[in-house]
Each structure stands twice: as structure tokens, then as C-alpha cells.
Image (cartoon, rainbow, N blue to C red):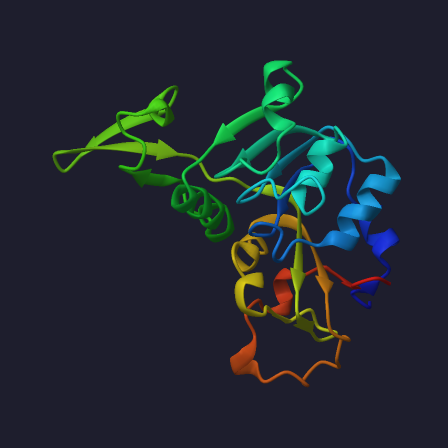
Amino acid sequence: MSKITTVKEAAARIKSGSVLHLGGFYAQGSPECLISAMLEQGVTDLTIISNDTGTPNEGLGRLVEAGRVKKLYCSYVGLTPILPKLIEEGKVELELVPQGTLIERIRCAGYGLGGVLTPTGLGTVIEENKQVVELNGRRWLYDTPIKADVAIVEAYRADTAGNLIFRRTQNNFNATMCTAADLVIAEIVEPIVEAGAIDPDEIMVPGVFVDVLVRKGV
């Protein structure tokens, strides 16, 4: 069965109440066409894991602005001005996670590991409501893996088997997110080529992880 479909059909597989890994670093590597389709289809009550919230006009920020998000796991939210108000009103729950800890929590979910032990956040508000573990004479914060129902990412190139290549900063969290979701949808910038047309040494995400491919704008 072909992995290639339309943006609209792919977005229809994302249901209200889903947990999403959403790629992007200040919207670089965010699947903007899929986000637009989600907005059009009325998907809401989303829990989203992403490095940051983008801006009101780019990336995750568009979903936040539209009131489609109920919970966020992010490292930085400073470019989405509406978010503090939404948090104060109880419309959005936010868990700020140090960037390195966030990507490792996602990696743990993808690699089948039990969680992360890290000193980052000790003695700060990050420590609140966390389990502290003493090991080898040191204190560590224990953080659980973060798995998603769906991961949506943007890649630069792909073949029909789902093998992906990212371009420069487009990579960011995307490759790791592809390992840690039940369904992975990749939005591709360049035309999708036949399987075998990509040098195996260039592949950044093997096609076994990718379920659905869409061409950007199609």
C-alpha cells in the first residue's frame, strides 16, 4: 500500500484529544500545510509536545492562537503573546521542560527506555512535583518518557518507502519524534522519489518509522 496521500486525508487521521509530537524549531521544520488542514478540519483538545510554540503566524503558535491546544510540553514559549492569558484562564496547561531533557524524554519513548535521570532543574521550580533519585552520591530528577499518538514533521526529501532527509535546521527534534509515536506523518518539500533513489548513507529517518507521506501543498 502506498504511503503517499493528500494533506487533507493525512490530517483527517489526527483526532481531537490526540497527543502530538510536532516538529520544528521556531517553526523551522514545522509541517505548515498539515497544521492548516488541522485548523480547517476543527481538530481540538490537543496535547502537543514541541521545542517551542512558534509564533502566532507560524508553526504550533497557529494552533495555540486558534484555541485548539489543551496542554503543552515545551522548552520556550516567549513568542506566543496570547499564551500567558490562556494559562491564567485555565484554558491551556503548560509544562516547561529544559530543552535537553525534553528531547531525551522523547528519545526514551522511541527507544523503549524507562526515563531520564538528569541534574538539570534541581533547586528550581522544575523540581516541583518531580521524583528525586539519589544515586552514586548525587541527586537526580527522574523524568518519564513522552510518547505521542501522532508525530507530524516536515522533511526536505523522501522516497516512496518513507525514508527521510532533513535539510539543515529543519532536522531539530524531527528525527527523534519519528521514533516515538504510533503514527508518523511527514510533509515533504521536494518531489517524492522512487524507493532506491536516495543514497542509503544520506537517510536520516528509515522508512520503517514513517507511515504517511504528503507533498507540501498537495
Vertical order, 19 against 129 (above or below): below
Question: Going by the image, does 180 lie left or right of 216?
Answer: left
The quadrant holding residue 123 is top left
Q: Nearer the viewer, residue 124 or 21?
A: 124
Question: Going by the image, does 64 lie left or right of 78?
Answer: right
Vertical order, 9 against 167 (above or below): above
Residue at 65 percent across and 27 percent down: it is 82
Question: In which quadrant will I find the N terminus?
Answer: bottom right
Vertical order, 23 against 42 (above or below): below
Residue at 46 percent across and 53 percent down: it is 111
Residue 72 in the image: state x and y as whole percent: 58, 32
- Number of residue marks: 0
Residue 140 in the image: state x and y as whole percent: 26, 33
Residue 98 in the image: state x and y as whole percent: 40, 39
The quadrant holding residue 166 is bottom right
Residue 29 in the image: state x and y as whole percent: 62, 58
Q: Nearer the viewer, residue 48 or 27?
A: 27
Residue at 73 percent across and 28 percent down: it is 45
The quadrant holding residue 214 is bottom right
Question: In which quadrant will I find the C terminus?
Answer: bottom right
Question: Going by the image, does 107 lie left or right of 203?
Answer: left
| Extreme-top residue of the structure | 89
